[in-house]
Amino acid sequence: MKTGSHMSDLKTSAIVLPGIINTALKLGVNIQDILRQLGISIDLDHITQSTIDLKHVHAIVMAVEKAAGHPAIGLLNGENFDFEYMPHLKAFLMSSSTMREAFENTRPLQKLISPLLILKLEETGNEVIIKLQPERTLSEEDERHYTEMVFSCIKTLTNRLMKKTVPPKAVHFRHGRSEITLLYTDFFGSAIVLNAPGNAIIYDRTIMEIPLPGGFPEIRRQAGNIVNQQIADSPLHGGLAEEIKRLLAKQCDLFNAPVAQLARSLNMSARTLQRRLAENGYGLSELRDQIRFQLSAQALKSKRLNIEEISEKLGFSDRHSFTRAFKRWSGLPPSAYRKKPSP
């Protein structure tokens, strides 16, 4: 993704753009001129590996909202987002057996789409509360657009998963734009609370355990394996995670090392390492497994090392332990994966 401005420190995947473009086209907005004026070009061939500054996404949304004269363009952006360029992520979500399974497995959204997509699930009484809790502070208008888009997407996906319209009980927004309330009420079909302490969409708790008509555990397992690999390769999966990956690739003895030893190798304290991992949505064990999977898959395809050597290099106690782990990650034993034609 090319932009005409300096890069900021917060980026999102470029796959958010097609939904915004579709919204603009449906509303008769000249999106081509908007992108040209902002100095933004799109490369669809590499869109899943492209990122864009979040401030540029917000600039596009503001320009489309102004040109269309629509007071809550984020609602339409969320409704038009359909994972066009992430079919495996869509299959992973849509093959969930229950709404609980779908709601509780949102980590890939943060790792593949936007680092701001931090959803927290709370259950109390007869309600399930899905809170949007980005760690970064956004301007009020940017937060409004972002929250509209995320809650619109949740509403759309919930209805698709349930194969019927299931309106939320209430939707809470931190902003106070009261002139949008009627539009929100019509769109969500529920009570709207403005000037709320936090952004949240609330459903009846009973929907959590209802078996979904599209539940397909085997497809979900296969799609989940692919999604895990995509997370490891995601351009948003950078920073500390990439630093740890480079370190472990060079010093494989650190795969089984205590946290304190790994932290020393990164020139930080164990507490700092754990805090930074938590801020990025990772546990160390999970990250080590992702890196092991990526390195072992690369080693198997390169065919320079035999399976016992790969197992030893990556810190497994024996080949059988490696085989069990690799089969859990990919669905195939290492020998079968090595024979499988590369895509």
Image: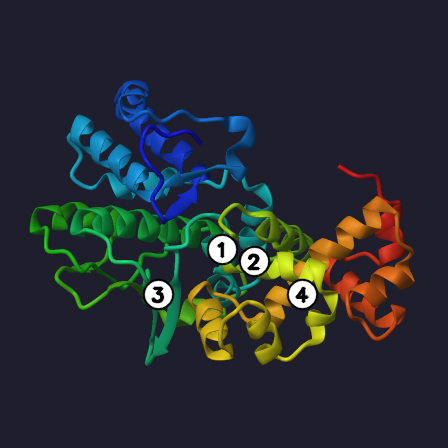
Q: Which of marks 4 and 2 is nearer the N terminus?
A: 2
The amino acid type found where label 4 is placed reads: Asp
The CA span between labels 4 and 3 is 28 Å
Number of the front mark, 3 or 2:
2
Number of the front mark, 4 or 1:
1
Q: Residues within 10 Å of mark 4 (few under 14, many from 20)?
A: some
Label 4, on which residue? 289
Q: Do the residues labelled 3 and 2 touch (CB within 8 Å)?
A: no
The residue located at (67%, 77%) in the rendering is 257
Label 2, on which residue? 243
* Residue 302 visible in the snapshot: yes
Q: What element carries label 1?
A: loop
The amino acid type found where label 2 is placed reads: Glu
Q: Do the residues labelled 1 and 2 touch (CB within 8 Å)?
A: yes
Q: Is mark 3 on a helix, strand or loop?
A: strand
The CA span between labels 1 and 2 is 6 Å
Classify residue 228 as left or right of residue 23: right
